Image (spheres, grey):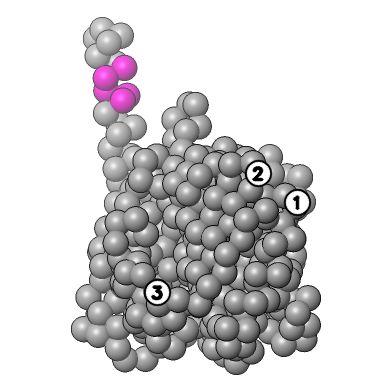
Amino acid sequence: MTIKRVVEQIFNIIQRILVKTKWKNSAMSALNANELLFEQKSLYKPPLEELQNVLQSILTRNFENVTVNVSQCPNLSASEYGLMDIGLGGCPTLLELGGAPYLLPKVQKDKLYDIKAICRKSMGEGKILAVGAGAGPYPLRNTNCEGIFNLSISAQDEIKNGSYTAKITGLQEDCLLEPIPDTETRCALLLNLYVCRGEPGPVLKINCKKRTGHMNFIECIRKGLYEKYQDKCVGLGGLFLLKNGKAHQHVMRDFSRSPIHTESELNQWLKFFEMPGTLHAVGTLVTHEHDLDLRLQHFHSFSRTKWGGHYHYDTTPDTIEYEAYFNVAERIVRVDKPKTTHKFGRD
């Protein structure tokens, strides 16, 4: 038998093993939503007009050009925005599922969730729009990945999925952005969603250009709201576009074989990129943990090209431009909160 033939046979065996493994992983069932702990608390909901003035003052400290308005939400399903329904109105809710302790220091792969079932249990009957940031469905990609979630659920439970995963691929460790099919509604480990009915209505529209301060766009908003409202817990969610400039973002590598105990070890495991706009970022922010062990801010972005990942901050302060559409949430739903927790891996 020639060396070439031996190599071909070895390659075929490896391929069969990989296919079987991928099939086994893809068939993994999500945890039963009815067996998970659901906790709910109200959030403080200032009028949008009040928030308009607060955010105008906050953001002016960090950006040279700032405009904050209360306006009717544009059609967010238009291609320039890319969401799966037209608006951010109707029972605006923050939903946090799982958490970083299920990923770090060692991954708990059994923490696989059904977004559709959890949203339905949280929101009841009617249509649902769910957008946000989390860990992607690793069985779908046969590797750890970022999840950029953007899906609508009809009143008849039909799914329209505009979600993506971003993963590390190849010897050069490139970023690969891939759409999630309508048939896939799982996520893993952790998730922060803004959930609503997708209805039209008033929203906060924010435009910022030329960053002059040191805080990132979301951090500036969150810390400013905390400064204003103190012990009153305020939460926002929705979409922002990084229209011009670049952002420092990470994509998780495949699950670490060794435990990760510190921020330094975490940053060595993550793969960082400078990603150019336009980026479409979806997620949530909240001013307090609200005795629910919450992640205070979490946004993931997708582009129309190869880019997607976890937003940290922009890297081009002189040319940066943000355009955001947010709504204020009226409650937080906390699902499957870790019993043992820690505070790293949440930036």
State whether residue 119 appears in this view.
no
> What residue do we see at 32% from left, 52% from top?
179
Q: Which residue is mark 3?
A: 73
> What residue do we see at 44% from left, 88% from top?
91
For marks 3 and 2, the one nearer the N-term is 3
State whether residue 5 appears in this view.
yes
- Using the rendered view, name the quadrant where residue 126 is placed: bottom left
Disc on res. 214: 1
Instruction: Give percent across and percent down for residue 23.
Output: 29, 51
Q: Which residue is mark 2?
A: 317
**Which quarter of the image is occupied by the N terminus?**
top left
Q: Is residue 165 left or right of residue 26?
A: right
Q: Closer to the camera, 18 or 127?
A: 127
Q: Is residue 299 magenta?
A: no
Instruction: Give percent across and percent down for residue 196.
Output: 41, 81
For marks 3 and 1, the one nearer the N-term is 3
For marks 2 and 1, the one nearer the N-term is 1
Compute the Cα span from label 3 to label 1.
Answer: 29 Å
- Name the amino acid, label 1: His
Highlighted range, magenta? 7-11
Q: Is residue 205 left or right of residue 209?
A: left
